[in-house]
Amino acid sequence: MLKIRRDFVDEIVAHARRDHPDEACGVIAGKEGSDEPERFIPMVNAARSPTFYEFDSGDLLKLYREMDARDEVPVVIYHSHTATEAYPSRTDIAYASEPEAHYVLVSTRDPETYEFRSYRIVDGVVTEEDVEVVEPSTKADTGSDGLHED
Amino acid sequence: MAVTVSIPTILRSHTDGAKSVEAAGSTVLEVLDDIESRHSGLKERLVKDSKLHRFVNVYVNDEDVRFVGGLDAEVSDGDTVTILPAVAGGAR
């Protein structure tokens, strides 16, 4: 199951709407082993295509170095489908290479509503999982802005 | 010529779980062959028909090797070679 804060869901959907009709993509990093998405990182779709997405190779290297330095992993890897359902395509499955990640797909084919679904993709096998959306107030301290009370 | 090779999660089953390994070689291909001699199976996950597989990115320091000669890209002592699976897909 994917447990994810509502503001992250909103950010992903907003990113997908913004880039529509091209596919949007990105990750939410979290501490290794925590399975908790904590840091939202929208990525540029280097393919700028309505039917394909790809992280720019330079951006990808920077992203992984940064995550390594922070002991983070890509807890969520998301992208949008803009004319089809939010289900992994053959291409998605062929490229999927993070067995620990939650692969989130959003469909923006309907301008009024969206589909938001999550999958594990391991060795070419797709397993859909439940998504539990939690309010950010219950996970307010992300530690990202360095505010402390002494 | 010793270089450090960073291994992505999905390929660590070929390196007994190690995040990075030391290797020798003056090109990316020689480095991969050297790793293969100790960790069999890794190379075939990266190379197909004598070319880098399209699902994977290999960097020498900050440079994607696709832009500097592919498998023939030069590697020097002390360099870091990073292997990362491409993050890609789409409805196509």
Image: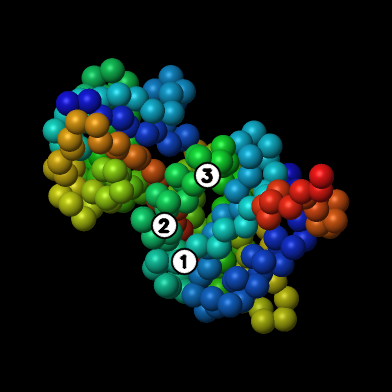
Query: Residue visible at 16% across and 44% down?
Result: B73
Query: Residue visible at 46% across and 35% down?
Result: B10
Q: Which residue is mark 2?
A: A59
Query: Residue visible at 31% across and 48% down?
Result: B62
Marks 1 and 2, how far apart at CA: 8 Å
**Tags 1 and 3 in contact by the CB under 8 Å rule?**
no
Q: Which residue is mark 3?
A: A67
How is this picture coloured? rainbow
- Eyeballing the image, is A48 above or below A142? below
Q: Which residue is mark 1?
A: A44
Residue A55 % position (x, y): 43, 59
- The earlier-in-sequence mark between 1 and 3 is 1
**Tags 1 and 2 in contact by the CB under 8 Å rule?**
yes
Q: Chain of mark 2?
A: A
- The earlier-in-sequence mark between 1 and 2 is 1
Left or right, A83 with respect to A60, comes to: right
Task: Please identify the residue farthest to the bottom as the structure is shown.
Answer: A111
Q: Chain of mark 1?
A: A
Marks 1 and 3, how far apart at CA: 17 Å
SS at badge 1: loop
Query: Residue visible at 40% across and 49% down?
Result: A61
Marks 3 and 2, how far apart at CA: 12 Å
In-front residue for pair A143/A105: A143
Quadrant that contains the N terminus of chain A: top right
In-front residue for pair A49/A146: A146
